[in-house]
């Protein structure tokens, strides 16, 4: 292993306990192969400062300056403490809280992240660049290029993506400059190694992205000249001369002008070492004479050059081209790889990429280049059979048709014999599957098969697979500008960005959009965007001539649907079924419910779609279609499935979601949900523990909300009822997570659905949810109306559980309005109803409200008596959620009595309960109470820490009231201390 290999070890090669931090793209943290949750952007900013200074002490002042700049908020220091604490938990989750953190340690005045340089990708990148420069200085050009390839592989997008603050801004600029320097050196090395085609391909997007960077222009001019494209090289000079004159009124640098003069007269200095061109050293000896294989080939038969036209206007995929060049024409003289397969989704540009790469390496294959379009995914055309392809190639190599056997095995053996001793590149474009090309693959060393396909070819041995995904935004924009002109692209930048988003980074879609605009010069980009915004017609609009996104996708679907294999037909059904359910992604159990098949069958079908590049698997077991494929699925399911079948699919998926959510909230020990009388058409996921329940709810939360909104908007009654049932089941999870705005939106939608269905039972439950959500955001008078409506409807329906719940919610709302007598009255009525129906949780809540009402009336002895009784019964019955509330109330009473030690004990016990029950919404209140207790005990530093945590927790849960109070108290620390007042927190009726 050489030095660069040693320093660029990836996280997957590290022992499981080793950490890694990557900043050359979206910031990520790794522990072995596990990706870590690094928290909010400013917390990630702190990590970035520590990581880029890995192993070095970083003061708190430097962290504050790096995150907030010259005018940090008063809370900055406390926020740093909070971020560091959270990062320690994220980086070392198994750490005993009593032991110090191993990776993130405290040092005098600050912190240090104990990582080696090879554990931070930016440090690895700089080291690789340094090695490349040293190798370049020693004329070790291949070694230098090897180092730069490793450096380039580390970049995953915009470095420090989404990270705020002056440090991130400075480092982003510095690292981007270093990357440009590395790319310039890369191009220089390619020229030194007599590979100008690759240098030109690398420089095209760079000069467009950095049009005023003169060094890039100079390298580009030389590369084009050495490719025999003198006119284009001169045009590059004219472009930058014009830009510099217009923008700055200056002439190009002397070295660039000298390069221009040499190109004008085709000076030999451009091809030979010369001291007059120090920036363009040419110290490599002339290329070796071609091998004698060309002469042997001429003696044996034809030398075929069948590649279609070189797509010289090719845009993007620079990294993929460099990798393909390395595979097909290794820099160290090794033989090329045996089989290289470019795979990707329909319309992703596989064929164009393959042709561009083939032209770049054609000199490496002096005995010819064979090409065939296998028509594996060509609409309306029969795919070629293996015997047809082999026979055609043998004829192209000079064999008489009479000598070509009709038997496939015999023809394949003859094919291998004809290639022995030659160096031929064989391009098999658009392969339908592995069976279509397998007889051609076993070719002698020195020959290479380059194939493209929508299939993944995961079972093919001795094959390098190169999957390609969507184009980057910049690449898509450049492609569009090539088609319609830079002026039209620049006229409306927002519309251009939206058009690229609507095309989903799919080259076929971008190309069709560009063709339509090119043929309609009076259209602005916004005109096409307005047409594409309508999802129902988007695929219809993305068609130009015989090119269409819909037909390209239809070929893949139809091949699966018409297959003789049951799994492939199931995969086609699964693809269509994704058009029924409007969620961001799906799992195998959900697809199993849609199709009414076992989850393992659904999983195999989804994996088949991943292999066909019709689905993306962002994380194991979670499948997501491209936006245009989702629209295609919607069209196909409407065309192929009856309305009854579509309704049945959706009902089964919703039933699965409702059933699993109900099981999860039961295992998570949430309060009893509102009732929605609806039969379920599918069983739940067999969750087995408290932890599994919480993990499932957290992972599926966004999908559950999307499914609920979709269902409640449906005209069909049963579907709407399933949507309401899903909201009822999910409510307490959302409430505990502290998501009031989201709760209010979906609760109001639930109320509208209940009223539309004219179902008073659903309407009553929805009034309760709306009231609770309004209470959370502080709209107490409006909440009071909904709680009263809930009570009226429950009494009309003789629904005793709902009645006691409505009374409890009224008591809570009156408490917060300061109407303590009304609070106690409602709570006592709740206790009577709860006792009558044997609902213990209702009794616990009523006792808590009665005690809180007495507290508000300053009748402390009665308050303590009621709250102590509530605490005893909560513990007896295992009601951890309500025990959290009781501790918070008791702490408030003890504070008002001046017993700070007892208050502290209550708030700490409440925090333990809240964290055990994952009641995130209660933490801001408890942390504020604990801080007040510590202030009275004279423990100011700890109090400030807990005030900061209360503020952070309040922000995370949208609790403006607690954030305001905690911020005011922290600002008052050090001033005249007043006896802190308490404000009862909000804990909802069960």
Image (cartoon, grey):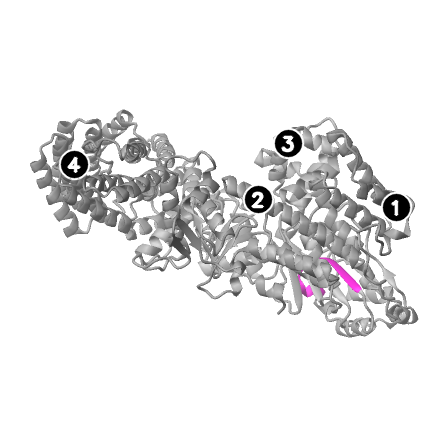
Q: Position of residue 616 (x, y in %)?
A: 55, 52
Dividing the picture into quadrants, the one containing residue 838 is top left
- Few, some or many residues within 10 Å of mark 2 (<14, 14–19, 20+): some
The residue singled out by tag 1 in the image is 262
First in sequence, mark 1 or 2: give its number.
2
First in sequence, mark 2 or 3: give its number.
2
Q: Position of residue 754 (x, y in %)?
A: 34, 33
The residue singled out by tag 2 in the image is 172
Q: Nearer the viewer, residue 485 or 924?
A: 924
> Distance of mark 2 from mark 3, alpha carbons?
23 Å
Q: Nearer the viewer, residue 10 or 370?
A: 10
Quadrant position of the N terminus in the picture: bottom right
Residues under numbered marks 1 and 2 in contact, where contact means CB atoms less than 8 Å apart? no
* Magenta highlight range: 425-437
User: In screen coordinates, is 763 left or right of 511?
Assistant: left
Residue 237 falls within the magenta-colored stretch: no
User: In screen coordinates, is 593 left or right of 800?
Assistant: right
> Distance of mark 1 from mark 3, alpha carbons?
39 Å
Which of the two discs, 4 and 1, sits closer to the camera?
1
Q: What residue lies at 80% left-to-right and 52% top-to-bottom? A: 280
Local SS, label 3: helix
Residue 493 has which mark?
A: 3
Q: Position of residue 331 (x, y in %)?
A: 74, 63
> Distance of mark 2 from mark 4, alpha carbons?
54 Å
The residue singled out by tag 4 in the image is 849
């Amino acid at each position: 292993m050489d030095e660069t290999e040693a320093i660029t070890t990836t996280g997957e090669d590290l022992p499981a306990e080793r950490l890694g931090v990557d900043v050359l793209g979206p910031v990520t943290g790794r522990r072995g192969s596990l990706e870590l949750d690094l928290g909010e952007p400013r917390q990630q900013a702190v990590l970035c400062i520590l990581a880029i200074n890995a192993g070095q002490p970083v003061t708190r002042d430097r962290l504050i300056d790096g995150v907030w700049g010259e005018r940090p908020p008063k809370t900055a220091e406390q926020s740093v403490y909070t971020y560091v604490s959270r990062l320690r938990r994220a980086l070392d989750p198994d750490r005993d809280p009593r032991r110090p953190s191993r990776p993130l340690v405290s040092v005098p005045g600050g912190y240090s992240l104990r990582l080696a340089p090879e554990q931070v990708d930016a440090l690895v990148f700089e080291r690789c660049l340094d090695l490349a420069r040293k190798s370049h200085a020693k004329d070790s050009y291949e070694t230098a290029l090897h180092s730069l390839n490793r450096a380039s592989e580390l970049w995953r997008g915009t470095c420090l993506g989404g990270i705020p603050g002056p440090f991130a801004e400075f480092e982003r600029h510095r690292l981007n400059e270093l990357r440009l320097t590395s790319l310039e050196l890369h191009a220089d090395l390619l020229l030194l190694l007599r590979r100008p085609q690759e240098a030109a391909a690398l420089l095209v997007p760079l000069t467009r992205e950095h049009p005023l960077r003169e060094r890039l222009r100079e390298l580009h001019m030389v590369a084009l000249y050495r490719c025999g494209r003198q006119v284009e090289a001169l045009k590059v000079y004219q472009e930058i001369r014009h830009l510099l004159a217009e923008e700055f009124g200056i002439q190009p640098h002397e070295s660039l002008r000298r390069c221009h003069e040499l190109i004008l007269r085709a000076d030999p200095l451009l091809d030979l070492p010369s001291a007059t061109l120090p920036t363009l050293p040419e110290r490599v000896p002339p290329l070796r004479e071609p091998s004698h294989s060309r002469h042997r080939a001429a003696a044996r038969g034809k030398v075929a050059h069948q590649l279609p036209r070189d797509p010289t206007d090719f845009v993007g995929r620079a990294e993929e081209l460099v990798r393909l060049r390395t595979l097909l024409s290794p820099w160290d003289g090794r033989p090329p790889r045996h089989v290289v397969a470019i795979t990707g989704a329909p319309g992703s540009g596989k064929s164009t990429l393959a042709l561009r790469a083939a032209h770049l390496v054609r000199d490496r294959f002096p005995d010819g280049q064979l090409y065939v379009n296998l028509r594996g995914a060509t609409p309306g055309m029969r795919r070629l059979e293996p015997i047809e392809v082999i026979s055609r190639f043998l004829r192209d190599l000079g064999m008489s048709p009479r000598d070509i056997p009709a038997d496939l095995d015999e023809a394949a053996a003859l094919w291998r014999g004809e290639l022995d001793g030659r160096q031929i590149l064989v391009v098999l474009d658009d392969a339908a599957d592995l069976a279509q090309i397998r007889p051609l693959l076993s070719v002698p060393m020195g020959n290479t098969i380059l194939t493209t396909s929508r299939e993944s070819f995961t079972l093919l041995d001795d094959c390098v697979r190169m999957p390609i995904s969507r184009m980057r935004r910049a690449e898509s924009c450049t492609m569009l500008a090539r088609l319609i002109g830079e002026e039209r692209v620049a006229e409306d930048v927002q519309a251009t960005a939206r058009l690229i988003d609507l095309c989903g980074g799919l080259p076929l879609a971008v190309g069709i959009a560009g063709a339509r605009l090119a043929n309609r010069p009076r259209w602005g980009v916004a005109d096409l965007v307005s047409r594409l915004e309508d999802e129902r017609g988007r695929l219809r609009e993305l068609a130009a001539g015989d090119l269409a996104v819909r037909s390209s996708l239809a070929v893949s679907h139809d091949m699966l649907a018409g297959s003789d294999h049951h799994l492939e037909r199931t995969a086609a059904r699964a693809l269509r079924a994704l058009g029924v359910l409007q969620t961001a992604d799906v799992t195998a159990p959900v697809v199993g419910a849609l199709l009414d098949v076992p989850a393992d069958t659904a999983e195999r079908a989804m994996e088949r779609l991943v292999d066909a590049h019709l689905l993306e698997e962002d994380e194991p077991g979670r499948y997501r279609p491209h936006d245009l494929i989702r629209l295609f699925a919607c069209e196909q399911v409407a065309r192929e499935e009856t309305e009854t079948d579509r309704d049945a699919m959706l009902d089964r998926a919703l039933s699965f979601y409702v059933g699993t959510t109900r099981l999860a909230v039961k295992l998570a020990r949430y309060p009893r949900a509102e009732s929605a009388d609806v039969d379920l058409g599918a069983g739940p996921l067999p969750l087995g523990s408290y932890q599994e329940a919480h993990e499932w709810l957290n992972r599926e939360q966004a999908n559950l909300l999307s499914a609920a909104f979709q269902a409640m908007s449906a005209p069909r009654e049963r579907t709407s009822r399933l949507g309401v049932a899903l909201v009822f089941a999910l409510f307490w999870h959302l409430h505990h997570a502290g998501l009031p705005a989201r709760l209010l939106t979906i609760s109001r939608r639930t109320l509208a659905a209940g009223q539309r269905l004219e179902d008073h039972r659903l309407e009553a439950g929805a009034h309760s949810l709306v009231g609770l959500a309004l209470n959370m955001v502080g709209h107490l008078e409006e909440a009071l109306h909904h709680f009263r409506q809930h009570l009226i409807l429950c009494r009309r329906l003789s629904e005793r559980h709902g009645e006691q719940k409505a009374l409890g919610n009224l008591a809570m709302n009156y408490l917060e309005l300061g109407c303590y007598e009304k609070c106690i009255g409602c709570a006592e009525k709740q206790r009577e109803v709860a006792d009558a129906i044997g609902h213990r949780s209702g009794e616990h809540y009523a006792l808590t409200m009665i005690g809180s009402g007495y507290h508000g009336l300053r009748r402390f002895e009665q308050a303590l008596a009621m709250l102590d009784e509530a605490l005893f019964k909560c513990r007896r019955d295992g009601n951890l959620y309500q025990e959290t509330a009781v501790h918070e109330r008791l702490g408030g009473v003890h504070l008002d009595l001046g017993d700070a030690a007892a208050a502290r004990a209550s708030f700490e016990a409440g925090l333990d309960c809240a964290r055990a029950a994952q009641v995130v919404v209660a933490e801001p209140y408890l942390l504020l109470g604990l801080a007040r207790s510590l202030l009275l005990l004279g423990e100011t530093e700890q109090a400030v820490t807990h005030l900061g945590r209360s503020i952070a927790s309040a922000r995370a849960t949208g609790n403006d009231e607690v954030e305001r109070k905690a911020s005011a108290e922290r600002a008052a620390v050090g001033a005249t201390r007043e006896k802190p007042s308490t404000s009862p927190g909000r804990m909802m009726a069960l």
